[in-house]
Amino acid sequence: MQHEYQLFINGQWQPPAEGRYFDCVSPYDGAIWARCPQAGPGQVDSAVDAARAAFENSEWAGYLPARRAELLRNLARLIEENVDELAKVQVQENGKLIREIRGQTLGLSRYCNYYAGLAEALGGETIPLSVPNMLNYTVREPVGVVAAITPWNSPLSLLMWKMGPALATGNTLVVKPSEVTPISTLLLARLVAEAGFPAGVFNVVTGFGDVGAQLVDHPGVDKIAFTGSTDVGRSIAAKAGSRLIKTTLELGGKSANIVFADSDIDEAVNGILAGIFAATGQTCLAGSRALIHSSIYDQLVERLVERAEKIAVGNPQDMATEMGTVACRKQFDKVMSYIEIAKEEGAKLLTGGKKPDFAGPDALFIEPTIFGDVHNDMRIAQEEVFGPVLCLLRFDTDEEAVRIANDTRFGLAAGIWTKDIKRAHAVAAKLRSGTVWINTYRRTNYASPFGGYKDSGLGRENGMEAMKEYTEVKSVWVNYGAPIKDPFDPRA
Ligand code: NAD
């Protein structure tokens, strides 16, 4: 019998109230390797109540920034000590590469240390008022109870992008991980408790979308931090809007990697391939559209196809593997259906497009797939596939490249490959996306703000911007000499 995990509410491990569990299925071989508790409605209430009580009444509410920083540093150390287990479980959950996830997970300790530093650095301002004898200053206060709802592609990183700034600024959290990747978050909860965070500060309720929806509707929640699909994000924004609570939404993308004729071709090829295939295409910032100058199109096609066909697809737990599986059956079916749509639309299949011959029925592999002769109005160029499918498009002028790159409802990221510094900055200025990379791709860092324009989201994660997203600003007025006159005295 597989190990049955428990919910983490108010510092206690709890079985699901109604005794319901769901299976965690490996995308590599279809094995059921764990059973995850499904939180009942009463348990979601308990988690929010615990977070509320911890925010208002517990010792946490009185902790100085230095103490919150100390706890984050404890967590950083524990993540380092447990990196192998945390990485291995994430690979088991979603089939992403151990060689990528291990480094990414180790990097979470740097996030904790960074936010520990910011806990003592974020302050208010003294406002230069043109009013005599009056001091005005601002303080930043935590928002309250944060519901953090996360997807399956990088479960712990995308959680850390939320919990790092939320905890540094004194909020409390109820986390709802994806039903595809819940166990890694439960393992992290164990470390959060061990780090010394008081009961109720960090709670985890696992389950499906209905658990997330209950949190979104819960009157005890003050802010929703969501990463996931644009459709769900839009519904969350509508509900949050009607309740007038804060949200940060990190949603989908259809990012363009623009390769100019004067680029370093070797680097551009590496950047394009890493941008789409390194995580089996399952990143919001995947460079799923490569826009290539017509004069180098044929040369680049040849190089991309040749290298894509050599990508070592296999067991994601093996350090030699270069591309793993997609995360779940639903996603596998979605990606395969987009491959059929692209063919029907007239895109030219250059390589891939099917399950590799070695893969058994339960192994969710898809070959690195490249479509040429794609037009930007095709669905394959407009809709997020979230899989190892690259579209190649041509352009002739810089203006045309910018127009095609921006001709999407998304605005998450874009890459520019050129040796011409003027062109690089001029194009970067015209791109409507939250991140622009010049001669690199798919880089993120705890210090650099990340988020989307248009349908790619609201607000920013990472860096000082994220700290601000988890605080309210209070403006305090102090009279140190202005006379307070009788308001009803006609002579005043
Ligand atoms: P999803 O929207 O289906 O689910 C995300 C989370 O929301 C899950 O925990 C899910 O259970 C929960 N959920 C589902 N319905 C809900 C509802 N009605 N109310 C509240 N919560 C609900 O997304 P997914 O399939 O897990 O992830 C893939 C998507 O995430 C892609 O579209 C991808 O682009 C996006 N993504 C964005 C970023 C970013 O930073 N912009 C990063 C990673 C993934």
Image (cartoon, rainbow, N blue to C red):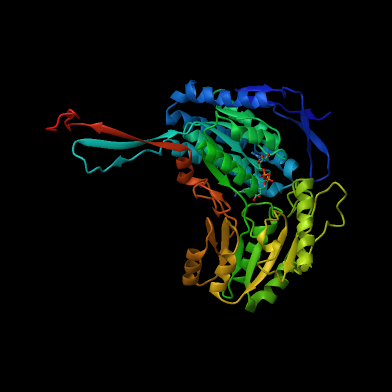
One can see residue 14 in this view: yes
For this view, does 356 lie left or right of residue 425? right
Residue at x 75%, y 68% (from the top left corner): 347
Q: How many numbered marks have been drawn onto this rendered protein structure?
A: 0
Residue 492, x across and y down, in percent:
14, 33
Q: Nearer the viewer, residue 241 or 250?
A: 241
- In the depicted structure, whether residue 427 falls above or below residue 84: below
For ligand 1, the image quadrant comes to: top right
Q: Dividing the picture into quarters, in which one does residue 387 lie?
A: bottom right
Residue at x 74%, y 54% (from the top left corner): 323
Q: Nearer the viewer, residue 341 or 312?
A: 341
For this view, does 107 lie left or right of residue 33? left
Q: Nearer the viewer, residue 452 or 438?
A: 452
Residue 403, x across and y down, in percent:
56, 69
- In the depicted structure, whether residue 429 falls above or below residue 296: above
| Quadrant of the image containing the N terminus | top right
Residue at x 61%, y 63% (from the top left corner): 256
Q: Dividing the picture into quarters, in which one does residue 191 lie?
A: top right
Residue 216, x across and y down, in percent:
60, 35
Q: Residue furthest left?
A: 491
One can see residue 109 in this view: no
Residue 303, x across and y down, in percent:
71, 70
